[in-house]
Amino acid sequence: MRSGADRISLSFDARDPDQRAIDGAEFKGRGHPDSLADRIADQFSRRYARHTTSQFGVVANHWVDKVTLVGAGATVGFGGYDIHKPVDGYLFGKVTERIGDRTLDLARIFEESCAEVFTQCVGDPELVRYLRLHVNNTEGVGPDHSPHFYRPAGPGSVSDVHAEDRVANDTSACTGTSRLGAAGRLARALENRVAGYRGELSAIGTDVKVMVVRRGDSLTATLAVPVHPRAVRDESEYAEVIGSVRQRILRDAGELVGALTAEPWKLTTVKINTKDRPGRGYLAPFGTSLGKGDCGAVGRGNRYGGAIEPLAVASSEAPAGKNPLHHIGKIYTWLAHDMARRVEAETGRYAETVVVSDNGSPLHEAAFCHVALAASRTGVSEQLVRKLWDEVLTRLPQYTAAFLAGREPGHDGS
């Protein structure tokens, strides 16, 4: 394992998001179509990997990072809705479909993945009835890989492929941050708190989207909160639900902000469903905009750090659905965030990382890793960063194992 001096660099030009004059972040709730697409892609990858491991003793090659959901066609009003076109779920990718003389049922794995995610994240079992699935598998053979890469003769040839081709699949730059800014932390906390209100306010759905902007010491939150059409008979009942959500947020605002920062910041403004007009409201069948025509795609949901922070360092990689064994967009995103968190834990300073791969290189030999720290150089050296980098590299197998076990690698010390 090598991490030589030419692979590591350190600078002190990162900007702590909480030190900026302005910061902003968006959080897409668990029922948002983009969140659902990300979760389904990862859940398919997990189910597929577990299935091939249980049946053949190996994880067969696959990637499905182009899952797309096309929302239902619906007529929606206060008191009810009519679905006249189902939700279409598309699985696009390259997946090993045969190992030797045995065919894998990709459609069934996709269906089970969708049903599990919809049940967990939407909570309305009726949605599964309106789901039409499509699998477009583009696996094939080319000279850039062994002919057994996607068409193995048996489990043994899959193992041979891993031994030969378990290297970086692409040249890519992945980024990580040591933590969210207060705006991102509050956006995520607000979505979680609204989810907790459902015990008393069952009319609200799970497709809650939150935008938080901090200007100086003032925080503004704008929320989109869907309401189940069948739960409100008219506009007045709808307004009562939204008013109850707003009252609860204002009641909990001090506690939420105080738990996120020691700064004397205040949540001064809460806006909900800003498109509402007399006779109009955010009504969503099944509690998600997927039920009324919205679409979702992998890579448009929350970033791996936990929210969408437009002012923070970010790469173009979408980790969901990528192969957990050798796809750099997934593995180095895990690694970059874990590295940034460990640097801040060691130094007490906000950190950002950039990790770059070379296509075909061993996974433990990234082209380079750059760490940017906020504040002064005092007490921090490249030797410390190199030590942490070497420790993180040893954890690569644990990242994959954590993902397959259903955990978030790098978030929980795995």
Image: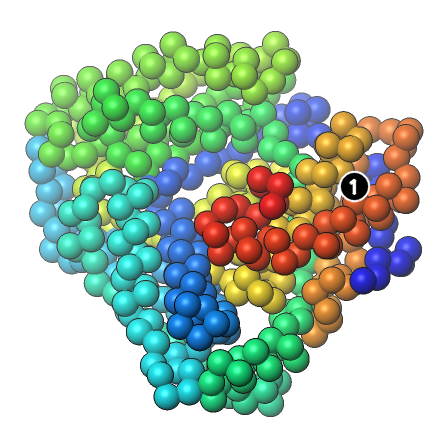
Q: Amino acid at mark 1?
A: Ala
Q: Do we see residue 122 in this rendering?
A: yes
Residue 37: give x, y in percent of width and height. 38, 54
In this figure, which colouring scheme has been used for the structure? rainbow
**Relative horizontal placement of residue 62, taking residue 316 as reference (left or right):** left
Taking depth in this image into account, of 391 and 367 the one nearest to the observer is: 391
The residue where tag 1 is placed is: 372
Give the quarter of the figure containing the N terminus: bottom right
| SS for callout 1 | strand
Q: Residue at x 41, y 68 (%)?
A: 54
Q: Is residue 137 above or below residue 124?
A: below
Residue 13: give x, y in percent of width and height. 81, 37
Q: Residue at x 70, y 65 (%)?
A: 363
**Relative horizontal placement of residue 314, taking residue 274 as reference (left or right):** right
Q: Quadrant of residue 371?
A: top right
Taking depth in this image into account, of 126 and 409 the one nearest to the observer is: 409
Q: Residue at x 49, y 56 (%)?
A: 404
Residue 83: give x, y in percent of width and height. 12, 51
Mark 1: few/some/many CA within 10 Å (<14, 14-19, 20+): many
**Relative horizontal placement of residue 67, taking residue 288 as reference (left or right):** right
Q: Is residue 135 above or below residue 258?
A: below
